[in-house]
Amino acid sequence: HYYPENIDRRFLGIKNLNLRAGPGDSSLLNEPIGHEIFKITGNPYLRISWGRLYITLTDESGKVLKPQEYKGLYWITEQLDKTYLRTRFKNPNGNLYKTTGATALLNSWWVTENPDDLKILGTYSPPYRRTYELKTNTEVDDYTDLRDFLYFINFDWENIEYITDLSIIAKYFASSIYQGSWDDYIIIAHNYYLYSDPNIGFVMIPWDIENNLNAFSSFLGNFSDAPLLNGYQDHFNWNNWGFWFGNWSWDPKTRPLWDNAAKDPVFVNYYLNEIEKILNETQYLLEKVDQWSNLINESLLLPFNVTSPRDASAYQTPYTIQIDNNSYINEKSRVINFLIDRQKFVEEELKKPVEEL
């Protein structure tokens, strides 16, 4: 229950909340810092906090069968839905698309005369879903706006601002690239939403961004010195991700929205201004790391009891803690070191002519 209770069960104006474990981030700091970076640029972001999860098992009558058990610390995030659009956009009536799988490249393959072709199911994994899944206005189910967006990206870039605002698109890419995110549009090509704002055109909204701030850097690459424009994708260790892309017939690095934008001087000017905004807030971000780690540290180190949804016999040693103290110190240091190293690298990069970036 939300307290104090209200008729439509909203909390801080939010109708739906997500409880997320953040399996790629033991510090539980990546996503909060990541969204704080999007907030700095003014790009739409998710409100996010933490919550302890306790579960009490009861029968249908309410009789307690198993007393309350602590199940760990989780992120609590707002849901990207109609309620979200009402709080972020002056016009919340446009189409909202969620990207699924790893083929949401915004490439020319999707551009046909019939926008209904965008409704075909992807082949990433069952249950098969549309690669661009419409989340609002589903009764009408009209993909014309998305088909047109893809057309301008791939075939009429000179007129791209008929259907989006490059200054807003620049906020998304600056935020993503500064924080070294490799699990969104530019590299894995998913984990973003597209909102077709009737007033300003298409806007990109981040989602599930915990693979940032040098998460898995020893395996997938150190992004603290990743280039700002040319070569960013090459910083990713594609060989270690080969099980995903190895047998695909198309170039996994094709990203026409980013590829075209990075060559457009109008976009690049907007983009570098947004990069500088983030750079100037490094101290603020470091203070947030300390503030938030002090807030959650005690909860992360509490002993807990995990009931696996899988066959318990497969687990020889059940989890009794979320993370040990030494590991947490290392994870927090990873976040801090990334922000400091990224600041130093970007400061030097911004001294170069644009042609050398």
Image (spheres, grey):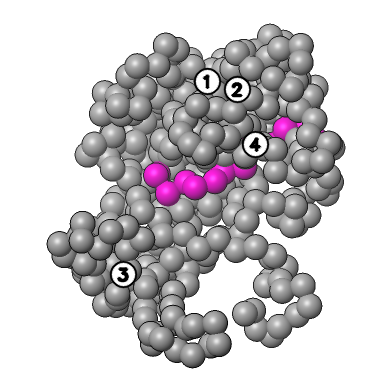
N-term-proximal mark, 3 vs 1 = 1
> In front of the other: label 1 or label 4?
4
Identify the amino acid type marked 2: Leu
Residue 29 bears which disc, if any? none
Residue 255 bears which disc, if any? 1
Horizontal side, residue 217 vs residue 154: left or right? left
Residue at 53%, 88% (x, y): give it: 62
Up/down of 264 relative to 26, above or below: above
Up/down of 92 relative to 186, above or below: below
Horizontal side, residue 20 vs residue 113: left or right? left
Q: Picture coordinates of residue 45 (x, y %)?
A: 61, 50
Magenta span contains residue 357: no
Q: What residue did someone put label 4 on?
A: 133
Q: What residue did someone put label 2 on?
A: 106
Q: What residue did someone put label 3 on?
A: 306
N-term-proximal mark, 3 vs 4 = 4
Magenta span contains residue 202: yes
- Closest to the observer, 37 or 99: 99
Other-residue count near label 4 (Cα within 10 Å), few / some / many at <14 / 14–19 / ≥20: many
Q: CA distance from mark 1 to mark 2?
A: 7 Å
Q: In the displayed orientation, state which residue is furthest to the top.
A: 155
Q: Picture coordinates of residue 293 (x, y %)?
A: 37, 68
Q: CA distance from mark 3 to mark 4?
A: 33 Å
Magenta-drawn segment: 200-212
- Considering the numbered disc 2 on the image, is that residue within a helix, a strand or a loop? loop
User: Pointers 1 and 2 in contact (CB under 8 A)?
Assistant: yes
